[in-house]
Amino acid sequence: LPELPEVENIALGLRKTILGKRIHRIDIRQPLILKGPHSSRWRRFMANIAGHTLTSVTRRAKRLIMTTDNRMTLLIQLGMTGKFLLRQEKSFRDHDLWQHTHMVMTLSDDVVVLYIDTRRFGRIWLLDGLNPKRPDTAMEAVGLGPLGPEALSINLTAFTRILHAQRPIKALLLDQTRIAGLGNIYADESLFAAGLHPERRCAEINDVQTRRLLQEIKAVLRRAIRAGGTTFSDFRNAYGDMGRFRSRLKVYQREGEACFACGTMIEKIVVIGRGTHFCPKCQPAG
Ligand SMILES: [Zn+2]
């Protein structure tokens, strides 16, 4: 699943190319992916967007938010395999994933934005009145679950507060209502960088470890964003590039291989139903 760094890279790529462009039309080829109160009247919603300009492409946690100058919003949850591809108008039907292309945005300057999703778990929410700087109210109003503070910007006081819990630290890091943006890859990588066992009870983590964990979460996410995210099979940015962070993963999907820091074999366990990778020596259990 795309996590914060992957969605951030998609937003960066789209912003560079489509911001300020006028939308000529939006064609929906698969209405089943649409959600929200406007989804049954999507033709009218899209007609109201046509002729308007894209004023922002932002991200909240793992959600991508595109807003127009008349405050109409497409909010995209990419699911497992959702992605965007930029094309020029003359060639946009030529690519081999055309059958999995569910939305086509035709913009000024012959730019076409395709939304492609082979496994079709992704969803597009049609919203109005969303403020891109404060999107949470509008998202919650249509039934999207509440989100905790962004993992990249949560401060130490707030982070310390959410650690007052008895559950394993890995479970907390995946809980989007407490801290938003981390998924399985970056939770495992952050815990390795901080030297914390994924099953450590949150409340047992002391102040020094808390500070270090927060620093490592942000450092891992920033490095992953700079590397264009992580691609295992499917993730691509809007230009079709793969993420380069996979080669820099220290524990995720490295079970049975030697730890880069100490040579011990990386192990894999299950924590709240999720495969979890760690080094038993660098991340001692208690
Ligand atoms: Zn190690």
Image (cartoon, rainbow, N blue to C red):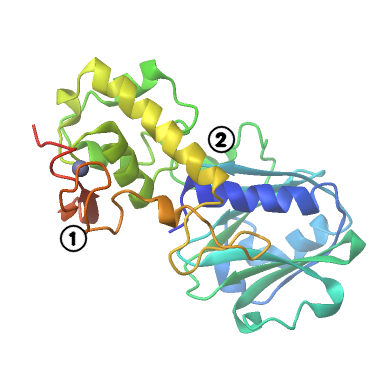
Q: Earlier in the sequence, mark 1 or mark 2?
A: 2
Quick check: which quadrant has ligand 1?
top left
Query: Viewer-proximal residue, 28 or 60?
Result: 60
Tally the marks.
2
Horizontal side, residue 62 vs residue 276: left or right: right
- Give the secondary structure at mark 1: loop
Which residue lies at the image location 38% right of the left edge and 45% below the top edge? 186
Horizontal side, residue 43 vs residue 165: left or right: right
Rendered location of residue 268, percent (x, y): 18, 56
Rendered location of residue 69, percent (x, y): 82, 43
Which residue lies at the image location 65% right of the left edge and 58% below the top edge? 38
| Tag of residue 14 | none
* Mark 2 Cα shell of 10 Å, populated few (<14), some (14-19), many (≥20): few
Rendered location of residue 114, percent (x, y): 70, 68
| Residue type, mark 2 in image | Thr
* Mark 1 Cα shell of 10 Å, populated few (<14), some (14-19), many (≥20): few
Rendered location of residue 274, percent (x, y): 24, 55
Mark 2: C-beta under 8 Å from nearest atom of ligand 1: no
Which residue lies at the image location 39% right of the left edge and 34% below the top edge? 217
- Quadrant position of the N terminus in the picture: bottom left
Classify 156 as above or below 111.
above
| Tag of residue 137 | 2
The residues bearing labels 1 and 2 have C-alpha atoms spaced at a distance of 45 Å
| Residue type, mark 1 in image | Gly
Query: Viewer-proximal residue, 105 or 200?
Result: 200
| Tag of residue 256 | 1
